[in-house]
């Protein structure tokens, strides 16, 4: 359903069927242009839904357009519901207020979540707030094995991440990548495979992780908290991957409202803030993995961009034509930057010259 007005009509019909939303008028639904690929975000003006602690929360509809993991609509909706439920006690994510089930009117369903009043982070000054938020998410209790589904579990976070990288790298031949860039990516893939073999003998303890922790997925509130708002891909895995994804060039430049490249010293300061907030035990777990996981996470992001470049040109759900023109132009520009030989070489210099390792001591 591409017509935005028809889409809002259908959402209003489904929303008004809920007893706690019966008074909502069609005119109360406001589409927010937040630049996402996988979701529409609809503000429901004037509606607040009570939560278990009796405080009413303003409502935002989070409406999937597609599943980035290829899940069926009901499975995708259930996965996202579980992400919000598992993270809520951290106090740094929006509360889940309800679900619109998958149906004819709403073919991908929708989540009713708390609308967070905040703004995008300012870099580098508010990276410490992001670090504290990630520490709180990572500190959440991990359920017993049989209680972890539907969330995915990376018992071996390196192997799990490499599997995604390998799948995404399969799109390279069709992505129009310069030969010099492709050669460097192939070198990084060879390193990642060797690293995965080595890491298999060094198990990591799974923690709840954000996965898509780039700074544009946080909102800073009036009290200085950085609230993580895009919970689509949370899983049980390695905290060091979140630390990488929050601070790599390919993450900090992704959102045009946040964009800023961090110097090595600024990344080190972000990590120091995380280690302090996480406490000695979690800091000791994460510290040895910080540098190699940055390299692997960058490869994950880079190959995701390669996959996006191909799918956005040929797959209906991923079509760049479904994006606002300004959003499409920005994504195409940053992806072109990320896959350029010069940018790849500049990013690789961090680990080839051991810059961050030296800054961390």
Image: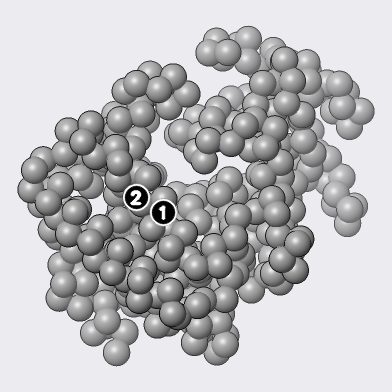
The residue positioned 13% from the left and 48% from the top of the image is 181
Locate the C terminus by quadrant.
Answer: bottom left
Horizontal and vertical percent position of residue 49:
83, 40
Horizontal and vertical percent position of residue 146:
75, 62
Locate the N terminus by quadrant.
Answer: top right
Q: CA distance from mark 2 to mark 1?
A: 5 Å
Residue 163 is marked as 1
- Looking at the image, which is closer to me, 258 or 242? 242
Asked if residue 353 is positioned above or below residue 79 in the image, the reply reads below
CB within 8 Å, label 2 to label 1? yes
Horizontal and vertical percent position of residue 262:
28, 64
Q: Is residue 330 visible?
A: no
Q: How many marks?
A: 2
Callout 2 secondary element: helix
Residue 166 is marked as 2
- Looking at the image, which is closer to me, 180 or 253? 180
Q: How is the protein colored in the picture? A: one colour
The residue positioned 37% from the left and 45% from the top of the image is 167
Position of residue 150 in the picture relative to residue 351 (left or right)? right
Asked if residue 342 is positioned above or below residue 196 in the image, the reply reads above
| Label 2 neighbour load within 10 Å: few <14, some 14-19, many 20+ | some
Position of residue 22 in the picture relative to residue 337 (left or right)? right
Horizontal and vertical percent position of residue 23:
86, 22
Q: Residue 10 appears in which quarter of the rendering?
A: top right
């Amino acid at each position: 359903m591409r017509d935005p007005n028809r889409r809002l009509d259908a959402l209003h019909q489904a929303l008004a069927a809920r007893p706690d939303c019966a008074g909502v008028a069609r005119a109360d639904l406001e589409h927010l242009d937040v630049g996402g690929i996988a979701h529409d975000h609809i503000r429901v003006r004037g509606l607040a839904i009570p939560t278990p602690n009796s405080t009413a929360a303003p409502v935002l509809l989070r409406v999937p357009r597609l599943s980035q993991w290829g899940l069926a609509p009901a499975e995708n909706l259930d996965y996202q519901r579980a992400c919000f439920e598992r993270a809520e006690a951290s106090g740094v994510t929006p509360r889940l207020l309800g679900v619109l089930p998958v149906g004819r009117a709403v073919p991908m369903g929708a989540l009713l979540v708390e609308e967070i009043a905040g703004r995008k982070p300012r870099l580098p000054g508010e990276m410490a707030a992001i670090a504290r938020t990630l520490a709180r998410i990572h500190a959440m209790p991990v359920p017993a094995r049989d209680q972890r589904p539907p969330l995915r579990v990376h018992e071996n976070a390196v192997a799990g991440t490499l599997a995604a990288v390998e799948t995404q790298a399969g799109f390279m031949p069709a992505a129009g990548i310069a030969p010099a860039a492709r050669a460097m990516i192939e070198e990084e893939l060879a390193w990642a495979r060797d690293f995965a073999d080595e890491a298999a003998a060094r198990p990591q303890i799974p923690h709840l992780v954000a996965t898509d922790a780039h700074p544009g997925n946080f909102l800073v509130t009036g009290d200085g908290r950085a609230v993580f708002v895009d919970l689509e891909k949370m899983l049980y895995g390695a905290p060091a991957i979140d630390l990488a994804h929050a601070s790599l060039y390919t993450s900090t430049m992704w959102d045009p409202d946040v964009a800023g490249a961090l110097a090595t010293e600024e990344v080190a300061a972000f990590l120091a803030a995380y280690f302090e907030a996480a406490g000695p035990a979690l800091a000791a777990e994460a510290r040895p993995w910080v540098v190699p996981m940055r390299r692997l996470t960058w490869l994950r992001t880079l190959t995701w961009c390669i996959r996006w470049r191909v799918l956005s040109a040929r797959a209906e759900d991923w079509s760049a034509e479904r994006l606002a023109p300004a959003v499409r132009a920005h994504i195409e520009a940053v992806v072109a930057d990320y896959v350029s030989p010069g940018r790849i070489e500049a990013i690789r210099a961090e680990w080839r010259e051991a810059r961050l390792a030296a800054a961390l001591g």
